[in-house]
Image (cartoon, rainbow, N blue to C red):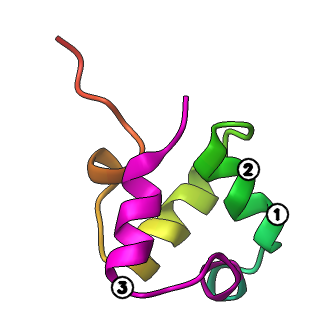
Amino acid sequence: MKNLKLKAARAALDMSQQELADKVKVSRQTINAIEKGDYNPTINLCIAICKVLNKTLDELFWDMLE
């Protein structure tokens, strides 16, 4: 499943995939794969991304259960 919330949060800060990748110390390809839904990041990477984008895990990665 694509992570459009991550992509939107990154875009809202006018941040490229490369800039986000540099800040969380992964490759641009990793960020691209997360956004496309091809890669499930570790919890530590999720937390690092949330800190950079000033979002919570709920806002970017966890869907609310009904």
Instruction: Inspect the image, locate mark 2, and give the three-letter code of the amino acid beneath it.
Output: Ala
Query: Where does label 1 land, which residue?
Result: 29
Separation (CA) of disc 3 from disc 1:
19 Å
Which image quadrant for residue 51? bottom left
Mark 3 / mark 1, whichever is N-terminal: 3
- Magenta highlight on residue 14: yes
Q: Residues within 10 Å of mark 1 (few under 14, many from 20)?
A: few
Query: Which portion, as a residue range, is magenta?
Result: 1-21
Find residue 33 and name its label.
Answer: 2
Look at 64% across and 44% down and name the residue there: 36
Instruction: Inspect the image, locate mark 3, and give the three-letter code of the amino acid beneath it.
Output: Leu
How far from the left and from the top, in percent, is residue 8? 37, 63
Q: Residues within 10 Å of mark 3 (few under 14, many from 20)?
A: few
Find residue 13 and name its label.
Answer: 3
Look at 82% across and 63% down and name the residue there: 29
50 with respect to 64 (left or right): right
